[in-house]
Amino acid sequence: MTSGFWGAFVKKTRRGEEGAVEGFAALDRNRVEFVVVAAAFLWISWVYVSATYAIAATKGLWMDEALAVSTAKLHSFSEISSAIWNGAEFSPPTYHFFLHLFMDLFGETGALLAPRLPSIVAVYIAALCVYALVRPSTDRLVALAAFAFTLDSGLFPYAVQARPYALIAACLAGSLALWSRMEHRRTTMRAVVLWLLLSVSVSLHFYGFVAPMIIGVMEMLWLVTRREWRWRVWAPLLLALPVLAAWLPLGLHLKAYVLLDAMGSGYYGRPTLDLLLDAVFQSLVSEQSGALLALAVLALCGCACLARRFSRRDIATAEDADRADGSNISPIEIMCVALFATPFLIFLFSLCFSSTFAVRYVSAASLFPALFFGCAVRRAPYRRAIGLALLPLAALGIDMRGADFSPGSMASAQPLLAKMKEAPLPIVVDAGMQYIELMAGSDPDLRSQLNFLLAPHSETRSDPTFENQVKRLAAIHSDFRVHEEQAFLAAVPCFYVLFRPEDTTGATLASLMRQGLLDAPLKAEGGIWLFRGGRGCRG
């Protein structure tokens, strides 16, 4: 009997020792995974910061950024509001107020980086929210890959722009994170924060209603699939409507300017099927690097499934069933459905109401690829290996975005502009977009040389948007030199003409050529051509 007792005791002790060894091994694996994730997180973050800094600190402001920054630089909130009312911008003044205060912190330093810094931070915050959304249902490495995909998504171009679209995406990502947490715990504080995020989104841009629209679609899907009414979600949505209504008079007033621009046969923002397809591809697939990542995900998942099928050991874990539900769609799946529908819903709104559509209006839907990846891979075999293998691809995509960018009109024109300072003749800029960009990025001496000529009354531009915008800005900014063509030709005998072939909206160069008032091109550098013209400056 003693031997039997002793044998049972030894057997139990051995089992305890084996359990302790397994526990320590699992603890070591968790520690190793944590260290790997932390190191990869810092690496991806560094690649993102380096790539965005390389662009934001050097690339010239493009037209929409020039409009935002020049408006935000006005002396007071009242001047900013007045300028927007008169067509300097087509959004509520909230973003410009914020940019005005933010740029004051930097003073004259960081003229290009400072107005873009909020967008860089906003996309990073959106990526952190995506990590928080994916992590509860899968492993750290998969969530980290989703974080990296967000930084390498269609949001990246907006991270380096002084525009509100990245901030809207951050508001949406924060709203999604709050919404997902309300599955288990709903508090009044979360409802208040959700309302604040939705209100900020609709106040940043007229298309900022994309955030409450997506949350509303998601909550309707929740109501249909779960048959549960959650007032702490519906209340913030309903209370965001008065905020949206407060900006409605300004929106209706500015719509008159938009309709004037849309009268041109070649209006760039007319809602078309081509624009919709472009928006779907750029937001839901994320251009070339996103397509490559999608193919890599499919290939790795396929290999993992084959490996699992032919493996002798069962690698399934209890974690595979954590989010399994035979009857209900999961929160992250609801998010994917709503985000996928976003480009189509915004296009329908543009077609029926606003008469203008652009890819940037649906940029917030670029959260879809990362969330869809997390949804698709969360129960895949070898998902840790898949996430780890995809991290270098995402980092490479981010790095390539930072290395492959156009310097912009101002940087391209700098060599020619520097030479023209030696012979300070007036400079006529052919296209309205380039004129606005050059006026925003030039020093006062050069600004005094720049001129824009209106199209003759006998001619009509196929897309008058940029000429109309120059005229509106000339009524706000006293240093904008805008002239009728014939009056300028009569007063100025000799001048330069700056022309960029890719700008198809300009008409001045063609008009001067028809009148025989241009010499052959003097120089061509960086995609910019320089002509000399005028009635008293031939030869």
Image: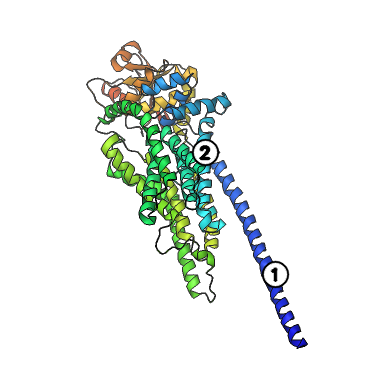
Q: Nearer the viewer, residue 529 or 479?
A: 479
Give residue 458's position: percent from left, percent from top.
Answer: 22, 21
Give residue 426's position: percent from left, percent from top.
Answer: 41, 17
Give residue 262's position: percent from left, percent from top.
Answer: 27, 31
Q: Residues within 10 Å of mark 2 (few under 14, many from 20)?
A: many
Q: Which disc is residue 120 wearing?
A: 2
Dot 2 falls on a residue whose secondary structure is helix
Say what amino acid the circle numbered 1 marks.
Answer: Ala
Give residue 135's position: percent from left, percent from top.
Answer: 53, 54
**How many dots with numbers?**
2
| Among the two numbered marks 2 and 1 on one chain, the one whose residue lies closer to the N terminus | 1
Q: Residues within 10 Å of mark 1 (few under 14, many from 20)?
A: few
Question: Is 5 situated left or right of 346 in this image?
Answer: right
Q: Furthest-left residue in view?
A: 458
Q: Which disc is residue 510 wearing?
A: none
The quarter of the image holding the N terminus is bottom right
**Pointer 1 residue:** 20
Q: Furthest-bottom residue in view?
A: 1
The quarter of the image holding the C terminus is top left
Looking at the image, residue 534 lies above or below residue 52: above
